[in-house]
Image: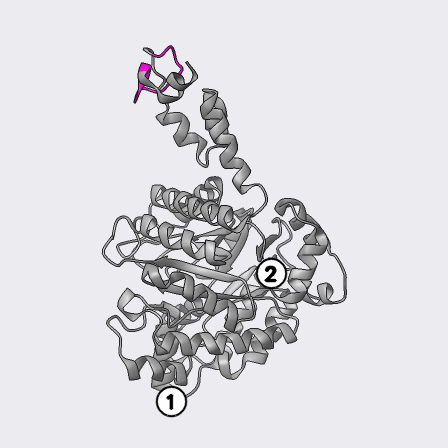
Amino acid sequence: MTQLEKARQGVITGEMTLSAVQEGVSPEYIRQGIADGTIVICRNVNHTAIRPLAIGLGLRTKVNANIGTSKDHNDLNLELEKLSVAIAAGADAVMDLSTGGHLADIRKAVMEKSTVAIGTVPIYQAAVKMLEEKKAISDMTSDDLFAVIEENGRDGVDFITVHCGVTRQSVAAVEAQGRVLGIVSRGGSMTANWMRCNGRENPLYEEYDRLLDVARRYDMVLSLGDGLRPGAIADATDQGQVAELILLGQLATRARAAGVQVMIEGPGHVPIADVEANIKLQKKICQGAPFYVLGPLPTDIAPGYDHITSAIGGAIAGAAGADFLCYVTPAEHLRLPSLSDVRDGVMAARIAAHIADIAKGVPGAFERDRKMSECRRNFDWQGQVDVSIDPEKTSALLEKSKSAEEEGCTMCGEFCAIKLGKK
């Protein structure tokens, strides 16, 4: 049985108990949230070497980091280094989005080394297989796609992004209204083109029960992907995005009925005034399912700084109820991220998540900030380092003032406001 099925029977599993300890809540709170569909636990039955990852209502806002090869940069060792950097920086989960090289081997290597939950997008591997066989992606059959999904589950992948809401109806809504940037999701674009070339419905939607059977067998969380998310703020909250979201709400209900855990992805590029409304709309339509947000990015003009853009949107989204932030790095829209990009992306997303946790009243979040203030009042430098979100950087930047007899940093020295206030 899956975690959801056990929760509905009133059973508190070991995974629920471990998650409760990590979150500072009761095991019963976790169980009830899973039963209600407002919490999921990511841990495939074949991936027990990792700690279970609980995501959802009333829990700490989690952060995901994306890694993965491309055809231009196919270096497994570098991606494994990125995995280590992401985990060391505090990522709660990592998605392998590889599209270059032997994807099955890359995935297995990532899973063997990871200590956190791993997610994938199976359609990438299915598409790459077609190209390796000198075929068009449109030649892919539903059996080809489901074989890859089964393989991911068998290998122990904890959650998969599946673009079930990209249907002929929702794509038609995008085309009818028109967009500045069209479909920006790789999986969404592949699916839309496949339907167009074959004159058929999306097999992930048409054969959704088949997908649920695979997910249930491995207790693999379905992350219902936002294949029609806006890639420009001018396209935000349009007919296509909303049409897909409505479908995802219906599919989430079917997943729960089948005993399959599910979360929802969204919303991409969204003006800052619309972020909260997008989160509340998703929560309403999808019956409180955990929301895994990509960004949201509230401006399009900051390449090189999109980790900051995303952190701004992510903090607002998290405060409004989003549960899981996918990091964005400074390299977004430009190239594959470097090791330093990965670290910067995780840290920016963690800051956004913590800001959101304060707003949501997550246990321990506000207390940590109070502790930092107390350390500053007492000129407890090591305390400030220890409680900071990035002790390594805090320690490296710290420069104590000699003129103030070390009771101040070199910005203010003897004119330190805290020191003067004490006198």
Q: In this rendering, does residue 122 appear at all?
A: no
Closer to us: 25 or 99: 25
Give above or below for 327 relative to 269. Answer: above
Q: Position of residue 136 (x, y in %)?
A: 34, 78
- Precedes in sequence: disc 2 or disc 1: 2
Name which residue lies at 40% across and 85% down: 169
Residue at 44% over, 81% down: 202
Residue 321: % across, % down: 50, 58
- Name the amino acid, label 1: Gly
In which image quadrant can residue 293 be found?
bottom left
Residue 330 lies, with reference to residue 420, above or below; the image says below
Q: Is residue 65 left or right of residue 21?
A: left
Residue 276 percent across, percent down from the top left: 42, 61
Q: Which residues are magenta?
A: 404-414
The Cα–Cα distance between marks 2 and 1, rounded to whole angstroms, is 35 Å
Q: Is residue 123 above or below residue 175?
A: above
Q: Secondary structure at mark 1?
A: loop
Q: If the image is split into quadrants, where does the N terminus sit?
A: bottom right
In the orientation shown, which residue stands out farthest toward the bottom? 199
Q: Residue at x 63, y 58 (%)?
A: 46
Residue 293 appears in the picture as rendered: yes
Residue 197: image location, x then y, percent:
34, 85
- Which residue is under mark 1? 199
Residue assigned mark 2: 40
